[in-house]
Image (cartoon, rainbow, N blue to C red):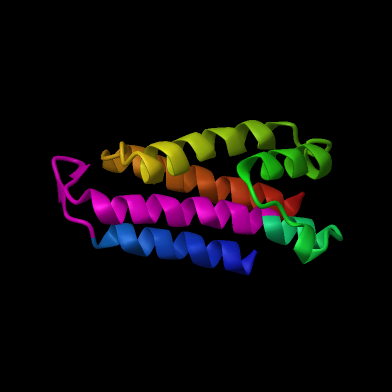
Amino acid sequence: MSEAIRYLKNAKDILGKVPIEDNIYTDIKPVRESCGTAYLAILKGIDEYLIKRGVDEKDLPQSVDGYRNMLQRYLIIHNGKLLKGFEALYKELHIAGYYRGNLYSVDMIKAAMRDAKTFIDKIKVT
């Protein structure tokens, strides 16, 4: 999971440079970048897991639906909660945080980063 953890560290490093006032990030652009990078960390973690399970690199998912299908196919038998976790992180980090830029709260974003790390750790031990 070294690549996934590296992406997640990069996401946290980006956040560390963003000014905060009253527990709110004041510059949304780097916050969006950080959320996007954290979401990519999750995808990298899934990719690394799939490759470890014998999926050829050329057959890795190319869309969120592809990732859902691969999670159902390879991971749900080990941990049914992983698909729910993926869905929540997709909506929080990718849609709300990156795509729409709707996350400002330091606490919310830090919680999403912790959840991303937990998700990657769960995949690592599965």
Horizontal and vertical percent position of residue 26: 16, 48
Magenta span dominant secondary structure = helix
Residue at the far left in the pictured view: 21
Report the front residue among 4 and 94.
Answer: 94
Q: Is residue 17 left or right of residue 67?
A: left
- Write down the region rendered in magenta: 18-46
The residue that appears at 52% across and 47% down in the rendered structure is 116
Q: Is residue 116 left or right of residue 60?
A: left
The residue that appears at 82% across and 44% down in the rendered structure is 74
Q: In the figure, 56 relative to 84: above or below?
A: below
Q: Is residue 38 magenta?
A: yes
Report the front residue among 46 and 108.
Answer: 46
The residue that appears at 45% across and 57% down in the rendered structure is 37
Q: Is residue 11 left or right of residue 126?
A: left
The residue that appears at 70% across and 51% down in the rendered structure is 61
Q: Is residue 102 left or right of residue 87?
A: left
Q: In the figure, 16 relative to 112: above or below?
A: below
Horizontal and vertical percent position of residue 68: 69, 39
Horizontal and vertical percent position of residue 52: 80, 62
